[in-house]
Image: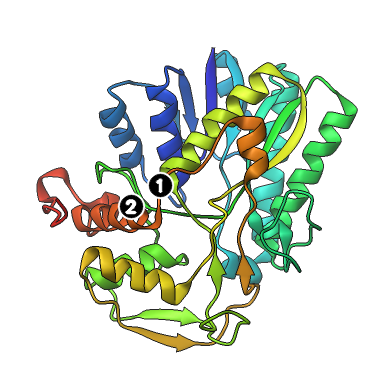
């Protein structure tokens, strides 16, 4: 019996695949490689020393996806696949609604048809929208402020309805805060296309000289220094959270949402200062206008995950910055870089 990982070649997916394989799980990976690389999966095999099946399939293609269920005994699903750029979702909402929601519907229909009723869903803290109170608990009001977040919220509601219709379903909804960092080996990490949408790869690319300066979107938020405050979590801690959630859905029924974060908020300026301190690299930056759909302050109350899943984030901000820089240093062109062109990191 295998765990199906959709979007397994992506940033969080690849790290979770390593943790699953190291924990002894058999996995099957599905990814359309639209925003990821098969090289990440080769490196997952390298890091784990284990092989697995990979299908280059788009979830929108029901016939192709059904082949995966026919050819493998799937026990549960971890569902990462989806478009995820907040700014792009504001510009291209129909693309996000079609891809994220329809793809999930196709997946869940096939799961139901083949009797696979255990799923860990990759949601997002964006489902909370503009929260009046921080830290944010799972029972906070929901109301996303952008199309990406609304796709996650709609899928959460779909999964709630699936359970109501059939209480055999076991569903864990994981609301991520802001994943950063990389595997400590420097072999897998965040590899955005073009100018990064997320803060840490933007910082590391400026540090490496690939970008001239960091653009800080908004300095008029109601925060200590005017820049947005977020809850940054190491991607390996996040991956470990998926294993804990998987254990939960394998042994129970029901549907529950869990925050995966540290419970600590850092502003953009504080993150820049932390990165400069631990790496010795200077990060020039320029303040610019807010991005549509962004909010000022967002950090988690993760105590439910600790209480019910036995999970807690263990890695601090220094390790997040160092691991992100190790990945960038060793892979200046991301997964396009050939192994024999890797440069040595200056991190001991």
Residue 196 relative to residue 93: left or right: left
Who's the residue at 31% across and 44% down the image?
Answer: 188
Decide: few, some or many residues near mark 1? Use Cα within 10 Å; few <14, some 14-19, many ≥20: some
Q: Quadrant of residue 131?
A: bottom right
Q: Kindly identify which residue carries mark 2.
A: 319
Read off the residue under disc 1: 315
Can you give x and y, in whole percent of width and height, for residue 133 in the image?
A: 73, 65
Name the image colouring. rainbow
Q: Quadrant of the N terminus?
A: top right
Q: Is residue 239 visible?
A: yes
Q: Position of residue 144 (x, y in %)?
A: 74, 62
In front of the other: 70 or 211: 211
The tally of labels here is 2
Judged left or right of residue 28, residue 294 is right
Above or below residue 4? Residue 40 is below
Q: Is residue 138 above or below residue 277?
A: above
Q: Is residue 89 above or below residue 251?
A: below
Q: Compared with residue 226, is residue 145 higher up or lower down, i.e. above or below?
A: above
Residue at 54% of width from left, 59% of height from top? 264
Tell me the CA gap for discs 1 and 2.
6 Å
Q: Nearer the viewer, residue 225 or 96?
A: 225
Residue at image location 27% in from the left, 69% down from the top: 277
The answer to whether the residues at label 1 and label 2 have Cβ atoms under 8 Å apart is: yes
> SS at mark 2?
helix
Mark 2 residue crowding within 10 angstroms, few (<14) / some (14–19) / many (20+): some
From the top left corner, tell me how far across and down residue 57 is, in percent: 52, 36
Q: Is residue 122 left or right of residue 161?
A: left
* Residue 31 - label: none
Residue at image point 78% right, 61% down: 143
Q: Which element is circle 1 on?
A: loop
x%, y% of residue 298? 62, 64
């Amino acid at each position: 019996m295998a765990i199906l990982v959709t979007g397994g070649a992506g940033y969080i997916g690849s790290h979770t695949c390593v943790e699953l394989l190291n924990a002894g799980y058999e996995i099957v990976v599905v990814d359309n490689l639209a925003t990821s690389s098969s090289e990440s999966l080769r490196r997952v095999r390298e890091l784990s020393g284990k092989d697995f099946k990979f299908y280059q399939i788009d979830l929108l293609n029901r016939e192709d996806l059904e082949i995966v269920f026919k050819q493998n005994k799937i026990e549960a699903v971890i569902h990462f696949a989806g478009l995820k750029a907040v700014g792009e979702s504001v510009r291209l909402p129909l693309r996000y609604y079609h891809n994220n929601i329809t793809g999930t519907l196709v997946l869940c229909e096939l799961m139901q048809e083949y009797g696979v009723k255990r799923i860990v869903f990759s949601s997002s803290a964006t489902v909370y929208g503009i929260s009046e109170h921080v830290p944010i608990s799972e029972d906070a009001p929901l109301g996303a402020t952008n199309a990406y977040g609304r796709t996650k919220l709609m899928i959460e509601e779909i999964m709630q309805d699936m359970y109501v219709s059939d209480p055999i379903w076991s569903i864990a909804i994981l609301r991520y805060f802001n994943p950063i960092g990389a595997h400590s080996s420097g072999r897998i990490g965040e590899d955005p296309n073009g100018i990064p949408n997320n803060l840490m790869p933007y910082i590391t690319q400026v540090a490496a000289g690939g970008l001239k300066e960091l653009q800080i979107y908004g300095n008029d938020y109601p925060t200590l220094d005017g820049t947005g405050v977020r809850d940054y979590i190491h991607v390996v801690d996040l991956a470990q959270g998926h294993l804990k959630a998987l254990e939960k859905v394998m042994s129970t029924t029901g549907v529950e949402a869990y925050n995966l974060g540290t419970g600590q908020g850092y502003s953009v300026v504080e993150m820049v200062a932390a990165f400069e301190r631990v790496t010795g690299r200077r990060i020039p930056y320029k303040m610019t206008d807010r991005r549509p759909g962004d909010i000022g302050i967002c950090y988690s109350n993760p105590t439910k995950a600790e209480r019910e899943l036995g999970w807690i984030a263990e890695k601090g901000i220094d390790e997040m910055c160092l691991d992100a820089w190790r990945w960038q240093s060793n892979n200046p062109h991301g997964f396009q870089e050939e192994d024999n062109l890797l440069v040595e990191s200056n991190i001991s």
